[in-house]
Amino acid sequence: MKNILLTCLFSGLAIMAFSQSTSLVINEVDYDQPSTDTTEFVEIKNVGQSAVNLSGYTLLFFNGANSTVYDTITFPSYMLQPNDYYVICGSGNYVPNCNQTENALSDLVQNGSPDGMLLAEILTTNVVDALSYEGDCTFPFIEGTGILTANADNNNDELISISRFPDGTDTDNNSADFSKRCSTPGIANSSSNTNCMPVTTNVSSHTYQVSTLFPNPANNVVNVSIGSNVGSSVSVFVYDFTGRLIENKKYDDVASTIEFNTAHLAEGVYIFNIKTSNSSITRKLTVLHE
């Protein structure tokens, strides 16, 4: 897997150089189900020989229709062991083996024609893996050619996803590596796409839950709602849409909600990364001053 050094994760996407590979791959994605899409997930696999701390990585979701990043996911300090899996889902109530819950009760991942995603290192902005499905997204949200619509997860079957087979195989060509198969979040990918059976839970629970920002757009103040998984302290990191760190604040003894002052921020779109003792989540905020 070639890693690509980007000048920025969120805009521009100008390629500067190629660099050393890593052992993480986007291994399986389920982005479409019958009716409301409540069981969507993305599975990351460590195909290397050493454990990898996921806190140094981010996952970007790409809208191929308008060539924009529509969401970003950051990870907690979690050591992903060799040959192990990490599952990001919209709702842990519906997806077994979910490690990180985004509390997007539906439509966590867009439905293609085409869409894509990439996994990147935060500090170096090296792209370590990319996926384009239901057609070809623009580089770097693609490797080789994108998955054809006929071989993608567009058949409205709740138990079908797109996954690498053999499990973890990476030839740097999305259309060769991924195909339509039975959904297997958190376990080895299936060789079959018929007579699929639900996967039983294999990990302890969905561990990391989302924070929300409101109102959005914000004027002078935004409320950061942490939810029920608050630790002893909360850190809020604010990035502009070029990925530049603007502000970093730590709050102690948080109950459930933080008031964050946005009056000093210029109008525009910002990325908020909220970290507690047991969670790390990224959300997008628009600032519009009245």
Image (cartoon, rainbow, N blue to C red):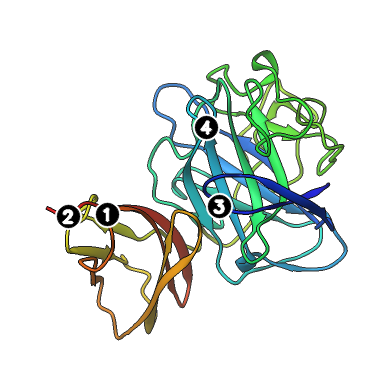
Q: Earlier in the sequence, mark 3 or mark 1?
A: 3
- Kindly identify the residue that appears in the image at 57 percent across and 16 percent down: 155
Q: Which residue is mark 2?
A: 289
Report the Cα–Cα distance between label 4 and label 3.
29 Å
Q: Which residue is mark 3?
A: 98
275 with respect to 44 (left or right) = left
Dot 4 amino acid type: Ser
Q: Which residue is mark 4?
A: 67
Can residue 26 be seen? no
Q: Quadrant of residue 289?
A: bottom left
Q: Which residue is mark 1?
A: 267
Q: CB atoms at circles 1 and 2 under 8 Å apart?
A: yes
Q: Earlier in the sequence, mark 4 or mark 3?
A: 4
Mark 1, other Cα within 10 Å: few <14 / some 14–19 / many ≥20: some
Relative height, residue 134 to residue 275 (above, below): above
Dot 2 amino acid type: His
Extreme residue toward the top, this view: 150
Dot 3 amino acid type: Cys
Which one is closest to the eye, mark 3 or mark 2? 2
Give the structural element (helix, strand or loop) at label 1. Answer: loop
Mark 4, other Cα within 10 Å: few <14 / some 14–19 / many ≥20: some
